[in-house]
Image (cartoon, grey):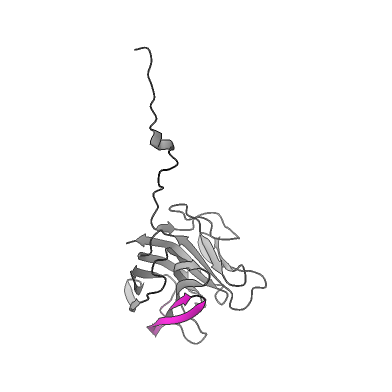
Amino acid sequence: MTGFEIVVPVSFNNALLETVPVYGFSDNFNRADNPNGLGYTSGENKPWKRYNGLTAFGGRVVSNRAVPYDVTGAANGAWGAEVVNANAANGTLKATLVTAGSKFGGLTFRASSNVDFLTLMMRTTGSNSTLVLAKKVANTTTTVATSATQGIATDGSVFEIVLSGTSITVKCNGVVVIPTQTVTELAGNTEHGLYFNQGSMDMVWDDVSFTAA
């Protein structure tokens, strides 16, 4: 034998092979400040996508945290949903509310556009701080359920949205705060993340993840 051969399987370079999807995501935001958005997740390098209303309102990275993106001249009530494609509709969305602030804003899940998504709001009015589970379908927002008590969202609270088919359960620090609700709309959507509102420029989030079921 005077030499040797290196055999490279054709499958390594086969463009017809199906790409295996990465399920779920995780992000600790430990990266350089980004004045224009949330960038890519720290766990899987998946891109954050923004849905919003009439302005470019949304989130950005500051000091290793996710905070609202302050757009000069944004209309009162401006909002922005920042989501990641988890390639899974069912599972658990989890996030740490570092600073509750004035509590407008929250979590977004099962999104597909700026007119179709579900939210968990920390509050929706100035006088009532109950959690609000809502659905926005074809640009019409409807309240699904509210928490039985007020003041649940506090600094350091860990929220979990458990999604299983048409069933949705909300937990705070491991305790159920909104019992299982049935929402038939948007059940197949796979984008989940954060919801920012101009009413809470002081709200701060960290350690966002989605674990597929």
Q: Which quarter of the rendering shows the C terminus? A: bottom left
Q: Residue at x 51, y 64 (%)?
A: 66
- Residue 5 is a magenta residue: no
Q: Compare residues 2 and 71 and report the one nearer the observer.
A: 2
Q: Please say if 148 is above or below 113.
A: below
Q: x, y (%) of residue 207? A: 43, 62
Q: Please say if 201 is above or below 91.
A: below
Q: x, y (%) of residue 174? A: 32, 71
Q: Residue at x 35, y 69 (%)?
A: 163
Q: Is residue 152 visible?
A: yes
Q: x, y (%) of residue 30? A: 49, 55
The quadrant in which residue 97 appears is bottom left
In the picture as drawn, the residue positioned furthest to the bottom comes out as 127
Q: Which residues are magenta?
A: 134-153
Q: Is residue 203 visible?
A: no
Q: Compare residues 1 and 147 and report the one nearer the observer.
A: 1
Q: Residue at x 54, y 60 (%)?
A: 61
Q: x, y (%) of residue 105? A: 50, 74
Is 24 displayed left or right of 51 in the figure?
Answer: left
